[in-house]
Image (tube, rainbow, N blue to C red):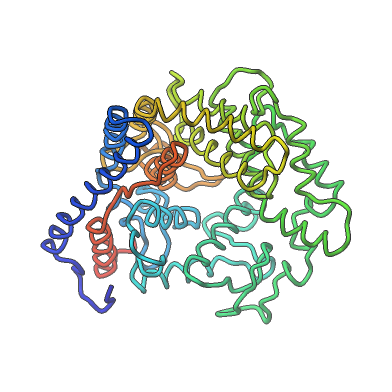
Protein backbone atom coordinates (compact mmCIF):
# COMPACT_ATOMS: atom_id res chain seq x y z
CA UNK A 1 0.00 0.00 0.00
CA UNK A 2 1.25 3.51 -0.86
CA UNK A 3 1.24 5.48 2.37
CA UNK A 4 1.22 8.79 0.51
CA UNK A 5 -2.28 8.20 -0.81
CA UNK A 6 -5.03 10.40 0.51
CA UNK A 7 -8.08 8.82 2.05
CA UNK A 8 -9.99 6.98 0.72
CA UNK A 9 -7.19 4.59 -0.14
CA UNK A 10 -9.67 2.34 -1.94
CA UNK A 11 -12.78 3.66 -3.63
CA UNK A 12 -16.18 2.05 -3.21
CA UNK A 13 -15.87 0.87 -6.79
CA UNK A 14 -12.50 -0.75 -6.07
CA UNK A 15 -13.97 -2.63 -3.13
CA UNK A 16 -17.04 -3.80 -5.07
CA UNK A 17 -14.85 -5.15 -7.86
CA UNK A 18 -12.73 -7.00 -5.33
CA UNK A 19 -15.84 -8.41 -3.65
CA UNK A 20 -16.84 -10.05 -6.93
CA UNK A 21 -13.41 -11.68 -7.16
CA UNK A 22 -13.61 -12.73 -3.52
CA UNK A 23 -16.96 -14.45 -4.11
CA UNK A 24 -15.38 -16.65 -6.76
CA UNK A 25 -12.37 -17.44 -4.60
CA UNK A 26 -14.61 -18.26 -1.66
CA UNK A 27 -16.75 -20.61 -3.76
CA UNK A 28 -13.63 -22.39 -5.00
CA UNK A 29 -12.35 -22.82 -1.43
CA UNK A 30 -15.60 -24.40 -0.28
CA UNK A 31 -15.71 -26.62 -3.33
CA UNK A 32 -12.21 -27.93 -2.64
CA UNK A 33 -13.11 -28.63 0.99
CA UNK A 34 -16.21 -30.54 -0.09
CA UNK A 35 -14.15 -32.63 -2.47
CA UNK A 36 -11.69 -33.54 0.30
CA UNK A 37 -14.52 -34.40 2.65
CA UNK A 38 -16.23 -36.51 -0.01
CA UNK A 39 -13.06 -38.52 -0.36
CA UNK A 40 -12.93 -39.02 3.41
CA UNK A 41 -16.55 -39.53 4.46
CA UNK A 42 -18.69 -39.78 1.32
CA UNK A 43 -20.73 -37.27 -0.64
CA UNK A 44 -23.79 -36.99 1.59
CA UNK A 45 -21.90 -36.33 4.83
CA UNK A 46 -19.45 -34.05 3.01
CA UNK A 47 -22.26 -31.80 1.77
CA UNK A 48 -23.86 -31.66 5.22
CA UNK A 49 -20.52 -30.84 6.87
CA UNK A 50 -19.82 -28.02 4.41
CA UNK A 51 -23.33 -26.73 5.02
CA UNK A 52 -22.70 -26.69 8.77
CA UNK A 53 -19.40 -24.87 8.28
CA UNK A 54 -21.24 -22.37 6.07
CA UNK A 55 -23.69 -21.72 8.91
CA UNK A 56 -20.74 -21.07 11.22
CA UNK A 57 -19.21 -18.57 8.79
CA UNK A 58 -22.55 -16.79 8.39
CA UNK A 59 -22.32 -15.88 12.06
CA UNK A 60 -19.18 -13.88 11.27
CA UNK A 61 -20.63 -11.84 8.39
CA UNK A 62 -21.47 -8.85 10.59
CA UNK A 63 -19.23 -5.89 11.22
CA UNK A 64 -16.35 -7.51 13.13
CA UNK A 65 -13.73 -6.27 10.65
CA UNK A 66 -14.90 -2.67 10.98
CA UNK A 67 -15.27 -3.07 14.73
CA UNK A 68 -11.64 -4.12 15.13
CA UNK A 69 -10.37 -1.34 12.87
CA UNK A 70 -12.18 1.28 14.95
CA UNK A 71 -10.44 0.10 18.14
CA UNK A 72 -7.02 1.14 16.85
CA UNK A 73 -5.71 4.35 18.38
CA UNK A 74 -3.80 6.04 15.55
CA UNK A 75 -2.09 8.45 17.91
CA UNK A 76 -1.05 5.95 20.58
CA UNK A 77 -0.33 2.94 18.36
CA UNK A 78 -2.30 0.32 20.26
CA UNK A 79 -5.71 -1.32 20.27
CA UNK A 80 -8.36 -0.84 22.92
CA UNK A 81 -10.11 -3.78 24.54
CA UNK A 82 -13.63 -2.59 23.74
CA UNK A 83 -15.75 0.38 22.67
CA UNK A 84 -16.36 1.45 26.26
CA UNK A 85 -12.61 1.43 26.92
CA UNK A 86 -11.99 3.49 23.78
CA UNK A 87 -14.67 6.01 24.71
CA UNK A 88 -13.72 6.44 28.38
CA UNK A 89 -10.76 8.64 29.31
CA UNK A 90 -9.35 6.50 32.14
CA UNK A 91 -8.78 3.51 29.83
CA UNK A 92 -5.94 3.10 27.35
CA UNK A 93 -4.83 0.54 24.76
CA UNK A 94 -3.07 -2.53 26.10
CA UNK A 95 -0.61 -5.13 24.82
CA UNK A 96 -2.91 -8.14 24.99
CA UNK A 97 -5.67 -6.43 23.01
CA UNK A 98 -3.06 -5.22 20.50
CA UNK A 99 -1.59 -8.68 20.07
CA UNK A 100 -5.01 -10.31 19.68
CA UNK A 101 -6.07 -7.66 17.16
CA UNK A 102 -2.99 -8.44 15.09
CA UNK A 103 -3.76 -12.14 15.45
CA UNK A 104 -7.26 -11.47 14.18
CA UNK A 105 -5.85 -9.89 11.04
CA UNK A 106 -3.39 -12.66 10.27
CA UNK A 107 -5.64 -15.55 11.33
CA UNK A 108 -8.98 -14.55 9.83
CA UNK A 109 -7.92 -14.26 6.19
CA UNK A 110 -7.29 -10.50 6.12
CA UNK A 111 -3.62 -11.24 5.60
CA UNK A 112 -3.92 -14.06 3.07
CA UNK A 113 -1.38 -13.68 0.30
CA UNK A 114 0.72 -11.22 2.29
CA UNK A 115 4.06 -12.40 3.62
CA UNK A 116 4.41 -10.34 6.78
CA UNK A 117 2.45 -8.28 9.29
CA UNK A 118 4.33 -5.19 8.12
CA UNK A 119 2.69 -5.52 4.71
CA UNK A 120 -0.84 -6.03 6.04
CA UNK A 121 -0.97 -2.58 7.66
CA UNK A 122 0.26 0.84 6.54
CA UNK A 123 3.77 1.81 7.60
CA UNK A 124 2.64 4.57 9.92
CA UNK A 125 0.48 2.09 11.84
CA UNK A 126 3.21 -0.54 12.22
CA UNK A 127 5.66 2.11 13.42
CA UNK A 128 3.08 3.28 15.93
CA UNK A 129 2.54 -0.23 17.27
CA UNK A 130 6.27 -0.80 17.70
CA UNK A 131 6.71 2.58 19.41
CA UNK A 132 3.76 1.91 21.73
CA UNK A 133 5.07 -1.51 22.71
CA UNK A 134 8.64 -0.36 23.35
CA UNK A 135 7.43 2.64 25.36
CA UNK A 136 6.00 0.37 28.05
CA UNK A 137 9.27 -1.34 28.93
CA UNK A 138 10.90 -0.72 32.30
CA UNK A 139 14.69 -0.20 32.00
CA UNK A 140 15.33 -1.62 35.45
CA UNK A 141 13.92 -5.14 35.06
CA UNK A 142 12.99 -5.45 31.37
CA UNK A 143 9.27 -6.09 31.97
CA UNK A 144 6.47 -4.10 30.30
CA UNK A 145 4.10 -1.95 32.37
CA UNK A 146 0.88 -0.18 31.41
CA UNK A 147 0.53 3.31 32.91
CA UNK A 148 -3.21 2.83 33.50
CA UNK A 149 -2.44 0.05 36.01
CA UNK A 150 0.98 0.95 37.35
CA UNK A 151 3.98 -1.12 38.28
CA UNK A 152 2.86 -2.01 41.78
CA UNK A 153 -0.46 -3.50 40.70
CA UNK A 154 1.13 -5.43 37.83
CA UNK A 155 3.99 -6.81 39.94
CA UNK A 156 1.39 -8.13 42.38
CA UNK A 157 -0.08 -10.23 39.54
CA UNK A 158 2.58 -12.55 38.05
CA UNK A 159 0.10 -13.79 35.45
CA UNK A 160 -0.53 -10.24 34.17
CA UNK A 161 3.17 -9.36 34.17
CA UNK A 162 4.15 -12.63 32.51
CA UNK A 163 1.53 -12.38 29.79
CA UNK A 164 2.41 -8.77 28.94
CA UNK A 165 6.07 -9.75 28.68
CA UNK A 166 5.11 -12.50 26.23
CA UNK A 167 2.76 -10.28 24.20
CA UNK A 168 5.36 -7.51 23.91
CA UNK A 169 8.00 -9.97 22.76
CA UNK A 170 5.67 -11.48 20.15
CA UNK A 171 4.46 -8.12 18.85
CA UNK A 172 8.00 -6.90 18.31
CA UNK A 173 9.02 -10.17 16.66
CA UNK A 174 6.12 -9.82 14.21
CA UNK A 175 7.61 -6.59 12.94
CA UNK A 176 11.22 -7.73 13.06
CA UNK A 177 11.97 -5.42 15.97
CA UNK A 178 13.68 -5.78 19.35
CA UNK A 179 12.89 -4.38 22.80
CA UNK A 180 14.87 -1.38 23.97
CA UNK A 181 16.30 -3.22 26.97
CA UNK A 182 17.16 -6.86 27.63
CA UNK A 183 14.16 -8.83 28.89
CA UNK A 184 13.72 -11.69 31.41
CA UNK A 185 13.00 -13.93 28.40
CA UNK A 186 16.51 -13.43 27.06
CA UNK A 187 15.56 -10.98 24.31
CA UNK A 188 18.43 -8.56 23.72
CA UNK A 189 17.66 -4.86 23.66
CA UNK A 190 18.60 -2.65 20.73
CA UNK A 191 19.10 0.47 22.84
CA UNK A 192 17.03 2.66 20.49
CA UNK A 193 15.54 5.52 22.47
CA UNK A 194 16.98 4.18 25.71
CA UNK A 195 16.73 6.48 28.71
CA UNK A 196 19.07 4.36 30.80
CA UNK A 197 22.83 4.40 30.21
CA UNK A 198 22.83 0.70 29.35
CA UNK A 199 20.41 -1.62 27.58
CA UNK A 200 21.35 -4.26 30.17
CA UNK A 201 18.37 -4.37 32.50
CA UNK A 202 18.47 -6.30 35.76
CA UNK A 203 17.33 -9.24 33.66
CA UNK A 204 20.82 -9.49 32.17
CA UNK A 205 23.04 -7.62 34.62
CA UNK A 206 21.97 -9.78 37.57
CA UNK A 207 20.02 -12.86 36.56
CA UNK A 208 18.67 -13.40 40.09
CA UNK A 209 17.42 -9.93 40.96
CA UNK A 210 14.97 -9.71 38.06
CA UNK A 211 13.54 -13.18 38.78
CA UNK A 212 10.39 -13.56 40.84
CA UNK A 213 11.26 -14.77 44.34
CA UNK A 214 9.41 -18.06 43.97
CA UNK A 215 11.52 -18.95 40.91
CA UNK A 216 14.89 -18.38 42.57
CA UNK A 217 15.35 -21.78 44.23
CA UNK A 218 13.95 -25.30 44.43
CA UNK A 219 12.62 -24.74 47.93
CA UNK A 220 10.94 -21.45 47.06
CA UNK A 221 9.21 -22.93 44.02
CA UNK A 222 8.04 -26.05 45.86
CA UNK A 223 6.61 -23.89 48.64
CA UNK A 224 4.90 -21.70 46.03
CA UNK A 225 3.27 -24.72 44.37
CA UNK A 226 2.18 -26.21 47.69
CA UNK A 227 -0.06 -23.19 48.27
CA UNK A 228 -1.91 -23.57 44.96
CA UNK A 229 -5.24 -25.41 44.86
CA UNK A 230 -5.04 -26.98 41.40
CA UNK A 231 -7.78 -29.52 42.16
CA UNK A 232 -10.15 -26.83 43.35
CA UNK A 233 -9.46 -24.28 40.61
CA UNK A 234 -7.47 -25.81 37.76
CA UNK A 235 -8.12 -22.90 35.41
CA UNK A 236 -6.70 -20.22 37.70
CA UNK A 237 -3.69 -22.29 38.72
CA UNK A 238 -3.05 -23.42 35.15
CA UNK A 239 -3.29 -19.83 33.93
CA UNK A 240 -0.87 -18.69 36.62
CA UNK A 241 1.70 -21.35 35.71
CA UNK A 242 1.47 -21.21 31.92
CA UNK A 243 1.79 -17.41 31.98
CA UNK A 244 5.19 -17.91 33.65
CA UNK A 245 6.32 -20.81 31.45
CA UNK A 246 8.73 -18.75 29.33
CA UNK A 247 10.33 -17.34 32.47
CA UNK A 248 10.66 -20.85 33.90
CA UNK A 249 12.49 -22.02 30.79
CA UNK A 250 14.87 -19.06 30.93
CA UNK A 251 15.50 -19.71 34.62
CA UNK A 252 16.18 -23.38 33.89
CA UNK A 253 18.80 -22.40 31.32
CA UNK A 254 20.54 -20.35 34.03
CA UNK A 255 20.34 -23.30 36.43
CA UNK A 256 21.90 -25.53 33.76
CA UNK A 257 24.77 -23.08 33.26
CA UNK A 258 25.40 -23.13 36.99
CA UNK A 259 25.41 -26.90 37.16
CA UNK A 260 22.36 -27.13 39.44
CA UNK A 261 20.77 -30.58 39.66
CA UNK A 262 17.13 -29.51 39.41
CA UNK A 263 14.87 -27.80 36.88
CA UNK A 264 11.78 -25.75 37.66
CA UNK A 265 9.95 -27.26 34.66
CA UNK A 266 10.44 -30.75 36.11
CA UNK A 267 9.27 -29.65 39.55
CA UNK A 268 6.17 -28.01 38.11
CA UNK A 269 5.10 -30.86 35.82
CA UNK A 270 5.85 -33.56 38.42
CA UNK A 271 3.68 -31.69 40.89
CA UNK A 272 0.88 -31.27 38.35
CA UNK A 273 0.99 -34.93 37.35
CA UNK A 274 0.71 -35.99 40.99
CA UNK A 275 -2.57 -34.06 41.24
CA UNK A 276 -4.16 -35.32 37.98
CA UNK A 277 -7.19 -37.61 37.85
CA UNK A 278 -5.95 -40.48 35.63
CA UNK A 279 -9.51 -41.60 34.80
CA UNK A 280 -10.42 -38.35 33.07
CA UNK A 281 -7.06 -36.70 32.40
CA UNK A 282 -8.43 -33.65 34.25
CA UNK A 283 -7.61 -32.01 37.58
CA UNK A 284 -11.07 -32.33 39.10
CA UNK A 285 -11.05 -35.11 41.68
CA UNK A 286 -14.57 -36.25 40.77
CA UNK A 287 -14.98 -38.35 37.62
CA UNK A 288 -17.75 -36.25 36.08
CA UNK A 289 -16.79 -34.29 32.94
CA UNK A 290 -17.72 -30.62 33.20
CA UNK A 291 -16.71 -27.22 31.84
CA UNK A 292 -14.62 -26.37 34.89
CA UNK A 293 -12.51 -29.46 34.37
CA UNK A 294 -12.02 -28.77 30.66
CA UNK A 295 -11.13 -25.11 31.23
CA UNK A 296 -8.52 -26.21 33.73
CA UNK A 297 -7.27 -28.83 31.27
CA UNK A 298 -6.52 -26.24 28.61
CA UNK A 299 -4.44 -23.98 30.85
CA UNK A 300 -2.59 -26.86 32.51
CA UNK A 301 -2.03 -28.48 29.11
CA UNK A 302 -0.41 -25.22 27.99
CA UNK A 303 1.83 -25.25 31.06
CA UNK A 304 3.19 -28.69 30.07
CA UNK A 305 3.44 -27.77 26.41
CA UNK A 306 5.24 -24.48 26.87
CA UNK A 307 7.97 -26.09 28.96
CA UNK A 308 8.28 -28.90 26.37
CA UNK A 309 6.97 -31.72 28.54
CA UNK A 310 4.85 -34.74 27.62
CA UNK A 311 1.26 -34.50 28.83
CA UNK A 312 0.16 -37.53 30.90
CA UNK A 313 -3.09 -39.45 30.26
CA UNK A 314 -3.55 -37.67 26.94
CA UNK A 315 -6.15 -40.08 25.52
CA UNK A 316 -8.37 -39.76 28.60
CA UNK A 317 -8.09 -35.97 28.44
CA UNK A 318 -8.88 -35.90 24.71
CA UNK A 319 -11.97 -38.04 25.24
CA UNK A 320 -13.12 -35.79 28.10
CA UNK A 321 -12.79 -32.69 25.92
CA UNK A 322 -14.81 -34.32 23.14
CA UNK A 323 -17.60 -35.34 25.52
CA UNK A 324 -18.20 -31.79 26.71
CA UNK A 325 -18.81 -30.39 23.20
CA UNK A 326 -22.48 -31.30 23.23
CA UNK A 327 -23.11 -30.81 26.93
CA UNK A 328 -26.63 -29.33 27.37
CA UNK A 329 -25.30 -26.68 29.75
CA UNK A 330 -25.39 -23.03 28.69
CA UNK A 331 -21.84 -21.66 28.72
CA UNK A 332 -21.18 -18.74 31.03
CA UNK A 333 -18.07 -17.49 29.16
CA UNK A 334 -16.73 -17.89 25.62
CA UNK A 335 -13.92 -20.03 27.03
CA UNK A 336 -16.47 -22.79 27.58
CA UNK A 337 -16.97 -22.85 23.80
CA UNK A 338 -13.32 -22.54 22.78
CA UNK A 339 -11.50 -24.60 25.36
CA UNK A 340 -12.67 -28.13 24.46
CA UNK A 341 -11.57 -27.65 20.84
CA UNK A 342 -8.41 -25.82 21.86
CA UNK A 343 -7.48 -28.49 24.40
CA UNK A 344 -7.78 -31.21 21.75
CA UNK A 345 -5.57 -29.27 19.32
CA UNK A 346 -2.96 -28.75 22.03
CA UNK A 347 -3.07 -32.43 22.98
CA UNK A 348 -2.51 -33.44 19.35
CA UNK A 349 0.46 -31.10 19.13
CA UNK A 350 1.90 -32.30 22.43
CA UNK A 351 1.64 -35.96 21.46
CA UNK A 352 3.41 -35.24 18.19
CA UNK A 353 6.22 -33.14 19.67
CA UNK A 354 6.91 -34.45 23.15
CA UNK A 355 5.56 -37.99 23.54
CA UNK A 356 8.54 -40.31 23.34
CA UNK A 357 7.10 -43.23 25.30
CA UNK A 358 6.70 -46.78 24.05
CA UNK A 359 2.94 -46.19 24.08
CA UNK A 360 3.04 -43.34 21.55
CA UNK A 361 1.79 -45.50 18.68
CA UNK A 362 -1.06 -46.84 20.79
CA UNK A 363 -1.94 -43.33 21.95
CA UNK A 364 -2.00 -42.11 18.36
CA UNK A 365 -4.29 -44.95 17.32
CA UNK A 366 -6.70 -44.20 20.17
CA UNK A 367 -6.81 -40.47 19.39
CA UNK A 368 -7.19 -41.13 15.65
CA UNK A 369 -10.20 -43.33 16.42
CA UNK A 370 -11.82 -40.55 18.48
CA UNK A 371 -11.15 -37.97 15.74
CA UNK A 372 -12.71 -40.27 13.15
CA UNK A 373 -15.81 -40.56 15.31
CA UNK A 374 -15.92 -36.76 15.55
CA UNK A 375 -15.57 -36.35 11.79
CA UNK A 376 -18.49 -38.71 11.20
CA UNK A 377 -20.54 -36.50 13.53
CA UNK A 378 -19.04 -33.18 12.38
CA UNK A 379 -22.29 -31.43 11.30
CA UNK A 380 -23.83 -32.03 14.72
CA UNK A 381 -20.69 -30.94 16.61
CA UNK A 382 -20.28 -27.80 14.50
CA UNK A 383 -23.92 -26.83 15.01
CA UNK A 384 -23.63 -27.42 18.75
CA UNK A 385 -20.72 -24.98 18.73
CA UNK A 386 -22.69 -22.43 16.66
CA UNK A 387 -25.57 -22.59 19.14
CA UNK A 388 -23.23 -21.72 21.99
CA UNK A 389 -21.40 -18.98 20.08
CA UNK A 390 -24.69 -17.22 19.31
CA UNK A 391 -25.19 -16.63 23.03
CA UNK A 392 -22.27 -14.16 22.96
CA UNK A 393 -22.90 -12.51 19.58
CA UNK A 394 -23.55 -8.77 19.42
CA UNK A 395 -25.39 -6.71 16.73
CA UNK A 396 -22.16 -4.97 15.65
CA UNK A 397 -20.55 -8.32 14.78
CA UNK A 398 -18.40 -8.56 17.91
CA UNK A 399 -18.72 -11.08 20.75
CA UNK A 400 -18.78 -10.54 24.52
CA UNK A 401 -16.85 -12.61 27.04
CA UNK A 402 -20.02 -13.37 29.01
CA UNK A 403 -23.51 -13.77 27.51
CA UNK A 404 -24.67 -10.25 28.25
CA UNK A 405 -21.50 -8.61 29.56
CA UNK A 406 -18.00 -7.83 28.43
CA UNK A 407 -15.28 -9.13 30.73
CA UNK A 408 -14.43 -5.88 32.59
CA UNK A 409 -11.13 -7.23 33.93
CA UNK A 410 -8.21 -9.00 32.28
CA UNK A 411 -5.89 -10.98 34.55
CA UNK A 412 -7.30 -9.05 37.51
CA UNK A 413 -6.96 -5.52 36.11
CA UNK A 414 -9.67 -3.26 34.59
CA UNK A 415 -9.95 -3.05 30.79
CA UNK A 416 -13.55 -1.91 30.22
CA UNK A 417 -16.50 -0.27 31.91
CA UNK A 418 -18.15 -2.74 34.29
CA UNK A 419 -21.64 -3.89 33.34
CA UNK A 420 -21.52 -3.04 29.63
CA UNK A 421 -23.27 -5.42 27.25
CA UNK A 422 -20.66 -5.09 24.51
CA UNK A 423 -18.12 -7.09 22.57
CA UNK A 424 -14.47 -7.17 23.55
CA UNK A 425 -11.28 -8.02 21.68
CA UNK A 426 -10.52 -11.16 23.65
CA UNK A 427 -13.94 -12.73 23.16
CA UNK A 428 -14.28 -11.65 19.52
CA UNK A 429 -10.91 -13.12 18.60
CA UNK A 430 -11.78 -16.30 20.52
CA UNK A 431 -15.15 -16.78 18.83
CA UNK A 432 -14.24 -15.90 15.25
CA UNK A 433 -10.64 -17.02 14.78
CA UNK A 434 -9.54 -19.26 17.64
CA UNK A 435 -12.59 -21.51 17.91
CA UNK A 436 -13.01 -21.87 14.14
CA UNK A 437 -9.35 -22.69 13.53
CA UNK A 438 -9.35 -25.36 16.24
CA UNK A 439 -12.52 -26.96 14.86
CA UNK A 440 -10.84 -27.32 11.48
CA UNK A 441 -7.63 -28.67 13.03
CA UNK A 442 -9.31 -31.29 15.20
CA UNK A 443 -11.39 -32.51 12.26
CA UNK A 444 -8.21 -32.72 10.16
CA UNK A 445 -8.59 -29.87 7.65
CA UNK A 446 -6.98 -26.53 6.90
CA UNK A 447 -8.86 -23.43 8.02
CA UNK A 448 -10.61 -21.62 5.18
CA UNK A 449 -10.33 -17.81 5.12
CA UNK A 450 -13.14 -16.13 7.04
CA UNK A 451 -12.51 -12.77 5.39
CA UNK A 452 -10.99 -11.76 2.07
CA UNK A 453 -9.18 -8.94 0.31
CA UNK A 454 -12.19 -6.62 0.04
CA UNK A 455 -12.56 -6.84 3.82
CA UNK A 456 -8.90 -5.88 4.25
CA UNK A 457 -9.38 -2.93 1.90
CA UNK A 458 -12.27 -1.73 4.02
CA UNK A 459 -10.22 -2.23 7.21
CA UNK A 460 -7.37 -0.12 5.85
CA UNK A 461 -9.78 2.59 4.73
CA UNK A 462 -11.07 2.88 8.30
CA UNK A 463 -7.55 3.18 9.69
CA UNK A 464 -6.71 5.92 7.21
CA UNK A 465 -9.99 7.74 7.74
CA UNK A 466 -9.60 7.80 11.51
CA UNK A 467 -6.01 8.96 11.19
CA UNK A 468 -6.88 11.75 8.78
CA UNK A 469 -9.73 12.94 10.96
CA UNK A 470 -7.42 13.04 13.97
CA UNK A 471 -9.43 10.40 15.75
CA UNK A 472 -7.29 8.72 18.34
CA UNK A 473 -10.49 7.07 19.48
Quarter-of-image position of residue 359: top right
The answer to which of 449 and 405 lies nearer the viewer is 449
Residue 34 percent location from the top left of the image: 29, 39
Looking at the rendered image, the quarter that the C terminus falls into is bottom left
| Residue 382 located left or right of residue 47 | right
Q: Is residue 345 above or below residue 245?
A: above
Q: Position of residue 288 (x, y in %)?
A: 60, 17
Q: Against 300, is 70 above or below?
A: below
Left or right, 246 with respect to 441, comes to: right
Q: Nearer the viewer, residue 100 or 88?
A: 100
For the point 63% across and 53% down, the residue is 162
**Is 254 placed above or below 97 here?**
below
Residue at the image position 56 percent from the left and 40 percent from the top: 348
Foreground: 317 or 218? 317
- Classify residue 106 by image quadrant: bottom left
Q: Which of the 4 image quadrants contains residue 419?
A: top left
In the image, what residue occupies the spot 71% across and 29% down? 276
- Hey, which residue is sitting farthest bottom in the picture? 197
- Estimate the x, y position of residue 72 in percent, counting from the top left: 36, 59
Amino acid sequence: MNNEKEYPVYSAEDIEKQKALDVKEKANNWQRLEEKLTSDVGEELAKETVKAFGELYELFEGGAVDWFANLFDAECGGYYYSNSARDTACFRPDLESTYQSLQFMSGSGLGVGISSQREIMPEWATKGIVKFTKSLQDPENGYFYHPQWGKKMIDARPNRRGRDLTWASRILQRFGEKPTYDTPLGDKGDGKGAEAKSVNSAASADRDSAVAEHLRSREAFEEYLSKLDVNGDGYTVGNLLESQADQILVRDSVLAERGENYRLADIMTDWLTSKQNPKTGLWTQYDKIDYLGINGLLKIMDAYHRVHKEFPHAVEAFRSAMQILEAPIEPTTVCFVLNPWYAMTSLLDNIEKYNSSEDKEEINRAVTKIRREMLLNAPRLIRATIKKLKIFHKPDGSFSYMPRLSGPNSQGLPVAIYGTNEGDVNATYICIVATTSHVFTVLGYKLLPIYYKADRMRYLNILEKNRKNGISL
